[in-house]
Image: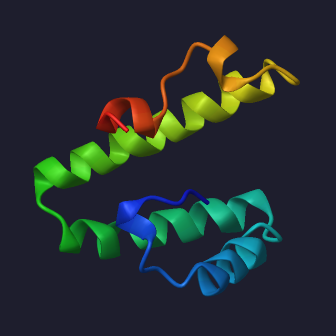
Amino acid sequence: MTTSRETDNLNHPALRKLVDEADQLPLPDLLTLLKGLIPVVARELSPADFDAFIKELRLKGDRFYDATGHPGTGRANRTVIGERDLEGR
């Protein structure tokens, strides 16, 4: 999990526990969980903000695949930009 101004006030231990528990689910159950969360998230966001969130998830996946494709190399040697680059941090 990342730490940033946006996440400073979150209960990271409780969120980490949820993530760790979800990580134990088989893939079909995990996908169902993700799909079940979409309406809850979409209800709280405008369509434009939801679209930005989906793009953020895509970037997270792209960065994961880029990092796993380049084990042992630092972020500076990889090709996918990170959230800090997008946010100018």
Q: Residue at x 42, y 80 (%)?
A: 9
> Eyeballing the image, is 70 above or below 12?
above
* x, y percent for residue 40: 32, 76
- Horizontal side of residue 72 vs 89, given as left or right: right
> Eyeballing the image, is 47 above or below 21?
above
Dividing the picture into quadrants, the one containing residue 20 is bottom right
Dividing the picture into quadrants, the one containing residue 21 is bottom right
* x, y percent for residue 88: 32, 33
Q: What is the number of callouts on the image?
A: 0
Front-lying residue, 36 or 87: 87
* x, y percent for residue 55: 35, 38
Q: How is the image coloured?
A: rainbow
- Horizontal side of residue 87 vs 59, given as left or right: left
Name the outermost residue toward the right. Answer: 72
- Horizontal side of residue 1 vs 39, given as left or right: right
- Horizontal side of residue 27 vs 4, given as left or right: right
Front-lying residue, 47 or 87: 87
Quadrant housing the N terminus: bottom right
Q: Residue at x 66, y 83 (%)?
A: 13
Q: Residue at x 88, y 24 (%)?
A: 72
> Eyeballing the image, is 61 above or below 47?
above
Quadrant housing the C terminus: top left
Q: Residue at x 47, y 80 (%)?
A: 10
Front-lying residue, 65 or 7: 7
* x, y percent for residue 19: 68, 72
> Eyeballing the image, is 13 above or below 22?
below
